[in-house]
Every structure is written in structure tokens, then in C-alpha cells.
Image (cartoon, grey):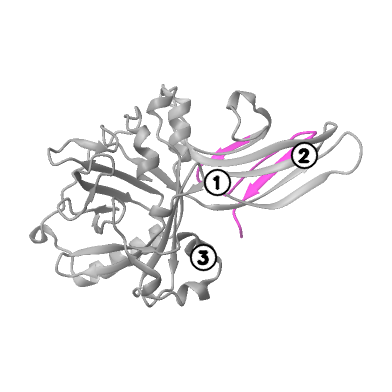
Amino acid sequence: MIARLLSRSIASRYLTVALACVLPTVGSATNSPIELRTQAELLLTRLNGEFDSYPQQFFEQEYKTPPELVHRRVYRSFARVDMPALGPEVLLATVRYGGKDGQLDPTETLLWVVTVDQERKAIRMSPRAPRDPRAAVEALNDPARLSQLEIAASEPSGGPAGCDVWWRLQGVQLVGMTDATACTSVAKNTGGVLAWSWHWVLTDDELWINFAGRTPEGDIAVGRPDQTHWRLGKAREFICQLSYQPAVGAAVVTGPIHVHDRGGLYRWQMPARPRPTPVFLQLARGMWPSNSGRNYLELLRLEVYEGRPEDPPDSWVAIGNSFASGASDRVGFVSPELSGHCQRPT
């Protein structure tokens, strides 16, 4: 993630966060043992799943933010896995760029071991790096392979993404921070030492992440100068269906289509006109920008376009769309040619 995000080190207009990045002292924490165990379970529950920053990117682009200021799209997943060789509670984490089907970052394919630290009154999340990141990701579909993974198949993670994260509950938010003095790496381009700080904020519906690599003088060498966060929304699974009615003949139906609601995509070749036409469906839940503030709200959007998602947006042709409230469990549209429908699994 670090190398891929170096070029995106400029401020976002709409997301500004002022948060302290210093760990509180042990004396300031009041968490009892039972509270810490409860918080650890809350952390595991909230992190388990998929997160995508597409809603943030969409908002910034629709708000006419200059392209160089827009946060790059990042997809993160956390899967709670049974790996007793590493610890009683383990999360397998992945990072991809551009969405769920985007490029995998092997440096952030990590096994996070979650434990309660009674002395520091915090939840400790310690990263281990699989020796074969892609094999670990593939093993997600085979729990037996994961449970048999020995410690020898992974190693303590190093580098910018290999820092312990210490979590504490603050109000309704779980806040995770790294120790500034314990998380360092050597910059490849200069050979100098960088001190890394990571800041995570987790709720039931969002995960915000920010980082910085600082020189001994305190200057930010890696990271956004304004230190705004990547804001990732927790995704919900939907099952969709598309139905195309050609001018002659029976309707062509495709489905079930499994997508998530934070920018999930499905590509289809619509069989007509007079040859198959590339079409893609996108389901997105996120904030809709409004200068007036009167319609600044979260919406669930189902959109179908002729074209390919990797092509310039001005080349897409909208052939179906529908809106619902962000809390809705279904959304759909009907037209003489094409209909689409998505809903939460029952």
C-alpha cells in the first residue's frame, strides 16, 4: 500500500480529521479485564469482513475535487481464521488497489494475531507475514489449509506495514495506534531511518486509516502532508439479477450475481445490437455530495452502463439506474429493454 500511495500525498477537500496520534499512558487507561475481553471481541467482529474506499472516491470526484487531490481507491478484507499455531484469535488481511478484483499488495497480506495486553490495558494486534502471500489468500476458500498452517510458514512482519497496532475503545469508536518509537524502517531511496505512525478508527460501518513515515527531523517523507484518512466503508453482500429483453425472442436473464454495496462490480456481455455488448453493473452505498446540504445523505445506487469500467467515464452509456436509502436492503429498476434488481440475502 505504501509504495502505491506515494503519489497520492495531497489533501482531500471533504475529509479532514484532526486526531491525536500519541498513545495514552498506561495510567490514563481505566479498562478492566472484562472490558478488554469485550473490546477484543468487538474488534474482531467489526474488522471481519470487506471494506472499500470507493464511496470516498466517488464523493470527492462528484464534488469536483481536482484529480490530484482525490484519495486512491483501496479495498481491504479481514477474515477471522482458525490458526491455533499462531494464536487463539487471528485475522487474515488483504489489500487491493482499485476494488475487490484489483491488484493485490503482498506486503499487506498479513496475519494479525489479536491478544489482550493487561499491562498496557489495550488490545494488541501483531502482524505476521505469510512466506507465500498468494497461497495464504487462496487458502481462504479452504479453512482446513489455514488451520494447519504452522508458524514456520510465516514470520514477524517488518517494514512500514509491519507494526503492532494498539487498540482502545473511545466512545463508540475503536481507535488503533502504533508506537512511534517502536515502528521504524530504512528508506530504500535514501538509506535513512523513517519512524512510522499508523492511525486506525473503526466503527460498525467504517474503517478510517492514515499513516506517515517521518524523518528524524519530523518531516513527512511518506504519506499525505495533511494527514487525512482513507475512509473505507464496511460492505454488505447483495445478490443481483439482470434481465434483457431483445426486440425479438425470449428474455435473457443472468444471475445470481454476488456483489458488495461499496462499489461492487459485475461485467456482462449483453447478447444483442447485433453482437454482444460489454455492460457492467455497479452497486454503491455512500454519501451523495450536496453544496446546499439539504440532500447530503447516504444512498444505495444501482447503475448499469454500456462500456467497461476501466474506460473513461464519459464513454459509458447509462442504460439503467435506481436509488434507495442507504439503509435499504433492496434496490431495482425496470425498463422495456433491461431490468435489474439487487437485494440482501435472506
Residue position for label 1 = 328
Q: Secondary structure at mark 1?
A: loop
What is the x, y in percent for residue 244? 79, 40
Looking at the image, is 338 positioned above or below residue 170? above
Is label 3 or label 2 in front? Answer: 3
Do the residues bearing badges 3 and 2 touch, measured as CB atoms within 8 Å?
A: no
Q: Is residue 328 magenta?
A: yes
Q: CA distance from mark 3 to mark 2?
A: 32 Å
Report whether 169 appears left or right of 316: left
Is 82 part of what is drawn in magenta? no
Q: Amino acid at mark 2?
A: Met
Judge from the rendering whether residue 159 lies leftward or rightward of residue 82; answer left or right. left
Q: Where does the image place residue 302, in percent across and percent down from the top left? A: 61, 39
> Where residue 20 sits: x, y (%)?
18, 44
The residue singled out by tag 3 in the image is: 140
Per the image, the residue denoted by label 2 is 270
Mark 2 or 1 closer to N-term?
2
- In which quadrant of the rendered image does the C terminus lie? bottom right
Identify the mark at residue 101; answer none if there is no mark: none
Q: CA distance from mark 2 to mark 1?
A: 28 Å
Q: Nearer the viewer, residue 335 or 58?
A: 58
Per the image, label 3 sits on a secondary structure element best described as: helix
Between residue 311 and residue 35, name the one nearer to us.
311
Please, is residue 155 above or below residue 175 in the view? below
Crowd around label 1: few <14 · some 14–19 · many ≥20 (10 Å): few
CA distance separating discs 1 and 3: 30 Å
Q: Residues within 10 Å of mark 2 (few under 14, many from 20)?
A: many
First to last magenta residue range: 322-346
